[in-house]
Amino acid sequence: MPSHSFSFHLRLFHRASTRFGREGYGFPEVSGDIGRFPRSLAIEHHPSDSRYPGDPARVRSYSFLDSYLRPLDSTYARRALGLRERTSPGGSATPLSAPAVRVLAWMEWLRCVLTTGSTHWPTWNLRYTMAYLAYVQSLPPGERERRFSIAADIRRAGGIGPYLGLDVPSYVETLTQSFPWDLSGPELLGKLLAFRYQHQRIARSCAEIYGGAQPRDP
């Protein structure tokens, strides 16, 4: 089987012609033509299957984001099984047990191997899912419940963009102008989410979130 798999990502775009919409990992909405570079110019995003899932800092950073954007619930189960995800926002989901997640992760691995003819990405995804599960299990029960509740709010709002107001370019400019550049991306996102959840509104500026609820370090 091939040792590598390919997928297309939008890396270069004209700002005025691109809109990041509802899903945190969703493909941007583009008004205009989209070109593609040949595979000979492909970016090797994860060059080592063994190195990335074993890097605690990177796994913690990605798992921090996924605990809000991709909770281990029935939506994950449908995605792992290759079923169509529900398009209508809203509705509470039940967290999956650790044994259920492990079984689903292996089923997703098998499905992706049979679909792509490659073990490269499916194996990487399997190892990450196991690491992500371990991260979620390491959180105190109260923190797990809080993140799951925020994830449900994000889903009801139609995605991370509408939930935080990040789908409005002028608001993003306001945040950028008030940001002191002393936080990493996940840390800033954590503060924005904590403020939104606690106060039930978006922050007026980055200065405001520094007085809000403090998220746990990613």
Image (cartoon, grey):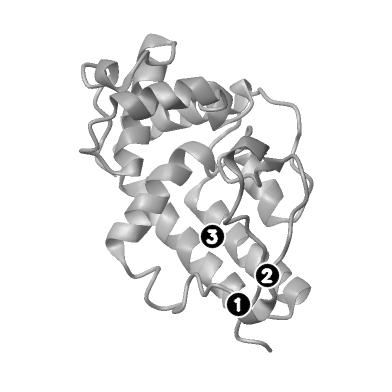
Residue at image point 43% right, 26% down: 173
- The secondary element bearing badge 1 is classed as helix
Residue labelled with disc 2:
37
* C-alpha separation, residue under disc 2 versus residue under disc 3: 36 Å
| Mark 2 residue crowding within 10 angstroms, few (<14) / some (14–19) / many (20+) | few
- The secondary element bearing badge 2 is classed as loop
Q: Amino acid at mark 2?
A: Phe
Q: Would residue 32 be found to the left or right of residue 2 on screen?
A: right
Residue labelled with disc 1:
41
Mark before the other along the chain sequence, 1 or 3: 1
Picture layout, residue 128 above or below residue 161: below
- The secondary element bearing badge 3 is classed as helix
Residue labelled with disc 3:
102
Mark 3 and mark 2 in contact (Cβ < 8 Å)? no
Mark before the other along the chain sequence, 2 or 3: 2
Nearer the camera: disc 2 or disc 3: 2
Picture layout, residue 2 above or below residue 170: below
State the quadrant of the C terminus. Answer: top left
Picture layout, residue 48 above or below residue 131: below
Nearer the camera: disc 1 or disc 3: 1
Nearest to the observer: residue 55 or residue 206: 206
